[in-house]
């Protein structure tokens, strides 16, 4: 390509493929694709260059993995394919264990108790203290969860909350995670309200 003014805008047609691997050397697996459209361009000595940006979000398949992005131009485009260097990204896994919801059958307006213990995986599962837990619920015929109260875990990762109920629902606890920790929530426990 020649004759492209510096800092002009052009269409860079193709896709960005995000891949991940447990080791820097691979094997590499596809995580997802991002369609890319525009970039700023320049030309030096008759050679066209482009600086492009892209963004996307994908669910991590491994708690610790290497990631790289590759650009594949459209088949009739005059751009070269490229691959980034691998980047390591990771978070600690978390898990809520020993979730208890009781009673599982009660009258409308009565209270139930939700308790459990939060753990963090630091090469072995250890209690995760001083973290915020959301007590969540959803009606059996819906998919969206809502939360009623939040509670802090003790130094041993334990938590307990008491809430008033008004209808039959699934109840659970949710740890929203942080920049260094994954979120977690065990399956809900059905509570029948009569």
Image (tube, rainbow, N blue to C red):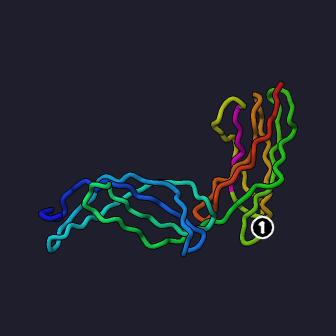
Residue found at the far top of this picture: 194
Which residues are drawn in magenta? 132-139
Measured as percent of width and height from the top left, residue 73 is found at 33, 58
Quarter-wise, where is residue 158 in the image? bottom right
User: Which is nearer the eye, 156 or 18?
Assistant: 18
Vertical comparison of 105 with 98: above or below: above
Q: Is residue 55 magenta?
A: no
Q: Is residue 137 magenta?
A: yes
Name the residue: 70% across, 44% down. 149
For the image, the number of numbered tags is: 1
Measured as percent of width and height from the top left, residue 85 is found at 44, 73
Name the residue: 83% across, 53% down. 98
Measured as percent of width and height from the top left, residue 81 is found at 35, 65
Q: Is residue 105 left or right of residue 77?
A: right
The N terminus sits in image quarter: bottom left
Quickly name the residue at label 1. Answer: 126
Main secondary structure type of the part rendered in magenta: strand
Name the residue: 70% across, 60% down. 94
Q: Is residue 63 left or right of residue 54?
A: right
Residue found at the far front of this picture: 75
User: Which is nearer the eye, 66 or 97?
Assistant: 66
Q: Residues within 10 Å of mark 1 (few under 14, many from 20)?
A: some
Quarter-wise, where is residue 191 in the image? top right
Quarter-wise, where is residue 70 in the image? bottom left
Q: Is residue 153 left or right of residue 91?
A: right
The C terminus sits in image quarter: top right
Q: Is residue 42 left or right of residue 149?
A: left
- Which secondary structure lies at badge 1? strand
């Amino acid at each position: 390509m020649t004759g492209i003014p510096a800092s002009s805008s052009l269409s860079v047609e193709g896709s960005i493929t995000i891949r991940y691997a447990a080791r820097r050397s691979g094997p590499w697996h596809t995580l997802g694709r991002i369609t890319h459209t525009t970039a700023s361009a320049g030309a030096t000595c008759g050679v066209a260059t482009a600086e492009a940006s892209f963004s996307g979000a994908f669910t991590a398949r491994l708690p610790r993995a290497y990631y790289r992005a590759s650009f594949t131009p459209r088949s009739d485009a005059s751009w070269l394919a490229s691959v980034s260097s691998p980047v390591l990204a990771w978070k600690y896994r978390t898990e809520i264990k020993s979730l208890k919801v009781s009673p599982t059958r009660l009258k409308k307006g009565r209270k139930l108790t939700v308790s459990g213990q939060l753990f963090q995986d630091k090469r072995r599962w250890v209690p995760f203290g001083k973290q915020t837990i959301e007590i969540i619920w959803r009606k059996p015929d819906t998919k969206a969860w809502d939360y009623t109260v939040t509670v802090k875990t003790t130094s041993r990762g334990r938590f307990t909350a008491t809430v008033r109920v008004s209808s039959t629902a699934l109840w659970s606890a949710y740890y929203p995670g942080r920049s260094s920790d994954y979120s977690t929530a065990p399956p809900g426990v059905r509570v029948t309200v009569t």
